[in-house]
């Protein structure tokens, strides 16, 4: 097994998914809230930001793509 197979860059989406998302949904840790196209509830992304796992710039990019903002809003992360 090569080093490339074992090393992986942790993305912002991974950081958001490191936390479960109750009570909004039952997606477990590390699994997207929505599987086709992989996305997460905005509340999960905001929770990761609040916990210091995402940058302000990343949040600005995510929120800049939204037209409507609700707790249940699904975000396909860049
Ligand atoms: Zn969710």
Image: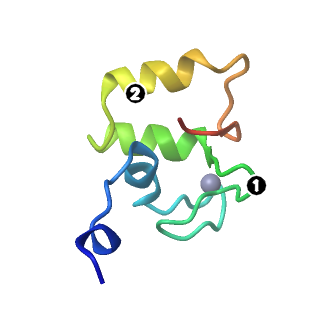
Q: Quadrant of residue 70?
A: top right
In the image, 10 versus 8, the foreground residue is 8
SS for tag 2? helix
Name the quarter where the N terminus is drawn.
bottom left
Q: Nearer the viewer, residue 45 or 61?
A: 61
Identified at 33% across, 23% down, the residue is 56
In the picture of the structure, the residue carrying the numbered disc 2 is 58
Going 30% across and 44% down the picture, which residue do you hit? 51
Camera-nearest residue between 32 and 78: 78
Question: Could you tell whether 68 is left or right of 31 in the image?
Answer: right
Assign a secondary structure to mark 1.
Answer: loop
Q: Residue furthest bottom?
A: 1
Horizontal side of 2 relative to 37 (left or right) equals: left
Position in image of residue 77 (x %, y %): 56, 38
To which residue does mark 1 refer?
36
For disc 2, does the CB lie below 8 Å from ligand 1? no
Horizontal and vertical percent position of residue 5: 34, 73
Distance CA(mark 1)–CA(mark 2): 22 Å
């Amino acid at each position: 097994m090569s080093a490339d197979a074992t090393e992986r860059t942790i993305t912002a989406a991974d950081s958001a998914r490191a936390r479960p998302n109750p009570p909004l949904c039952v997606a477990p840790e590390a699994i997207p809230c929505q599987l086709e196209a992989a996305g997460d509830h905005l509340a999960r992304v905001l929770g990761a930001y609040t916990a210091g796992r995402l940058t302000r710039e990343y949040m600005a990019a995510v929120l800049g793509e939204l037209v409507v903002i609700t707790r249940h809003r699904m975000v396909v992360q860049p």
